[in-house]
Image: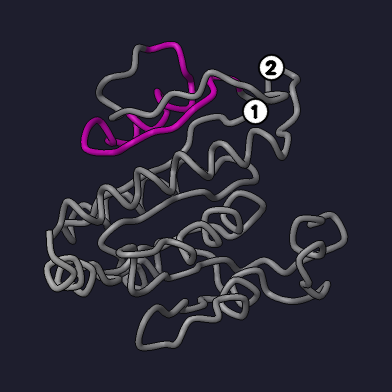
């Protein structure tokens, strides 16, 4: 292959389309950073959604320069140093509810919201995304000390042993939704460690990029 042929291929491998990141907490931040660093492809636009502000418990944020009281989605926008015509992060400083689903415009939608029972909200997001023709990825339990057996596959491929997945099914999400899980939930009395979050973020990023490229 000649240099001109290689350059022609490289010139075509540019950022394209949009990935929306619903939830910009400890996991969402890691995924956002991964997406920003994707080269020779990846999303042109990243939509970051979170109505929460950074507090003293958000050590992963403050370690890399965030200020306490700053919106999490705004911090993700701020650390994206690409030129806007190459890649841009759009910050939405509000949580997604049934009333503002139309803000979600991603071709791939990553749902990593946490705190309380998030499944009804996640189901509404997934249904809205599917109506638009978007692909979706979410989680169903990511607890564990580290070195976990992480699974990711379509929701239709899981057995009935994960109650979080079963709740999603009861909400009408039965196919065409990728679910990642360590098969450990809060009931299992294990923490969520940074080691687990790093690995989960890596796997979600890889799969989101593959789904994005499937659209080309």
Of mark 1 and mark 2, the one earlier in the sequence is 1
Q: Is residue 172 magenta?
A: yes
- Left or right: where 33 falls relative to 151: right
Q: Is residue 200 above or below residue 91?
A: above
Q: Position of residue 156 (x, y in %)?
A: 25, 24
Q: Position of residue 193 (x, y in %)?
A: 73, 34
Q: Is residue 26 above or below residue 37?
A: above
User: Is disc 1 placed on a helix, strand or loop?
Assistant: loop
Choose top left, top right, bottom left or bottom right for residue 188.
top right
Choose top left, top right, bottom left or bottom right for residue 69.
bottom right
User: 3 or 63: nearer the eye?
Assistant: 3
Residue sitting farthest toward the front? 2
Choose top left, top right, bottom left or bottom right for residue 133.
bottom left
List the residue tagged with mark 2: 188
Q: Which residues are magenta?
A: 160-184
Point 69% across, 35% down: residue: 195
Q: Position of residue 92 (x, y in %)?
A: 51, 76
- Left or right: where 91 falls relative to 135: right
Give neighbour class at mark 1: few <14, some 14-19, many 20+ (Cα, 10 Å).
many
- Left or right: where 12 falls relative to 207: left
List the residue tagged with mark 1: 143
Asked if disc 1 and disc 2 are in contact, CB closer than 8 Å, the reply is yes
User: Is disc 2 placed on a helix, strand or loop?
Assistant: helix
Give neighbour class at mark 2: few <14, some 14-19, many 20+ (Cα, 10 Å).
few
User: 160 or 184: nearer the eye?
Assistant: 184
């Amino acid at each position: 292959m000649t240099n001109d042929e290689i350059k022609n291929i490289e010139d075509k491998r540019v950022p394209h389309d949009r990935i929306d990141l619903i939830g910009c907490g400890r996991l969402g931040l890691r995924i956002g950073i991964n997406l920003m660093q994707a080269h020779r492809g990846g999303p042109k636009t990243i939509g970051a959604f979170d109505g929460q502000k950074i507090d003293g418990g958000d050590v992963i944020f403050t370690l890399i320069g965030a200020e306490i009281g700053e919106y999490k989605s705004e911090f993700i926008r701020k650390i994206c140093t690409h030129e806007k015509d190459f890649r841009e992060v759009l910050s939405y400083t509000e949580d997604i509810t049934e009333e503002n689903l139309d803000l979600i415009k991603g071709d791939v939608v990553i749902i990593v919201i946490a705190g309380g029972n998030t499944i009804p909200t996640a189901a509404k997001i997934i249904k809205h995304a599917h109506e638009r023709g978007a692909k979706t990825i979410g989680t169903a339990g990511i607890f564990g000390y580290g070195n976990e057996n992480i699974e990711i596959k379509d929701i239709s491929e899981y057995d009935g042993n994960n109650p979080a997945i079963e709740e999603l099914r009861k909400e009408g999400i039965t196919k065409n939704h990728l679910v990642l899980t360590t098969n450990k939930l809060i009931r299992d009395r294990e923490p969520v460690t940074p080691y687990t979050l790093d690995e989960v973020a890596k796997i979600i990023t890889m799969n989101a990029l593959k789904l994005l490229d499937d659209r080309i």
